[in-house]
Amino acid sequence: MNETLKTIHNLKSIREFSDKEISKEDLEKILNASIQAACASARQNYSIIVVEDEEILKKLFYRANKGLLFCIDYTRIIDTAKYLKYEFCPDNIQEFITGSTDTILAAQTAAIAAKALGIGSLFTNSVHRAPLPEIYELFNLPQEFCFPSVALCLGYAKKEPAEKRGRLTTGVIHYHKHKRVSSEEIDSIIEEYADEKKNLGMTAEQLTKYGVKDYFEFFFTKWTRPRNPERIEDLYNTLTKAKFFRS
């Protein structure tokens, strides 16, 4: 396996970071690699906010050494159009999807670059669990045509996870056309999640802790229920205010 594939296959989510500092040089390498990601029409419909404030890192970035907040952001393009006396208004769902794709590609590239430098990472939706008006104020985000998409925590692992989490292939990879999973394939998926060696689901200790018989009981009855209607409403309202969604 070549070094690039080895780096991708060795990506792990780190939840405990050491006090070791990421050097300015390595941070610049990560950022410069991030912006090399594919993007629509060479527009880079995103902004990256580098977070170094200890209190913010503690609150939103799992006490990581550095945080990167990736935002869908059209304001730079809008301002350029206005300066050149052109009209451009990305007030539609297509532009939101395009901007979202650009942003996530840049974020994932940053995580891969960090791993190549021996720096761990963790993606988190912590910026969506907090009240979004507070996030906009905290990072001075434009109210229109800008949305905080995902946060990336960066740092050196205090302790490397024992194993990389497994990944499912059944029902995920399709050739030629999409195909719904059969009952037999669902049974196979359930077996894969139950196999601790594959590290897809939960350990016996975790099942006991949450009082569930398997990963799917945990996922469908505890992890995804009950939903927080106020938080979902906050997301819709913010996207509408940002003019990506129309009221």
Image: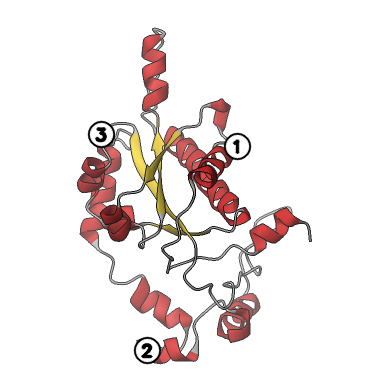
Percent x, y of residue 155: 47, 58
Looking at the picture, does residue 167 appear above or below residue 131?
A: below
Task: Pick whichever of labels 3 and 1 is earlier in the sequence.
Answer: 1
What crowding class fits label 3: few (fewer than 14 Cα within 10 Å), some (14-19), or many (20 or more)? some
Residue at the spot 48% in from the left edge and 41% down from the top edge: 103
Residue 209's label in the rendered image is 2
Discs 3, 1 touching: Cβ within 8 Å? no
- Residue tagged by mark 1? 38
Q: Which secondary structure, mark 1?
A: loop
Task: Pick whichever of labels 2 and 3 is earlier in the sequence.
Answer: 3
Percent x, y of residue 14: 48, 66
Which quadrant of the structure image shows residue 174? bottom right
Residue 177's label in the rendered image is none
Q: Nearer the viewer, residue 140 or 187?
A: 140
Q: Is residue 100 left or right of residue 63?
A: right
Residue lying at the far right of the rendered structure:
1
Looking at the picture, does residue 85 appear above or below residue 174?
A: above
Q: CA distance from mark 1 to mark 2?
A: 42 Å
Residue at the spot 57% in from the left edge and 72% down from the top edge: 165
User: Identity of the amino acid at label 1?
Assistant: Ala
Percent x, y of residue 7: 66, 58
- From this viewpoint, is residue 166 visible? yes
Q: Nearer the viewer, residue 191 or 103?
A: 103
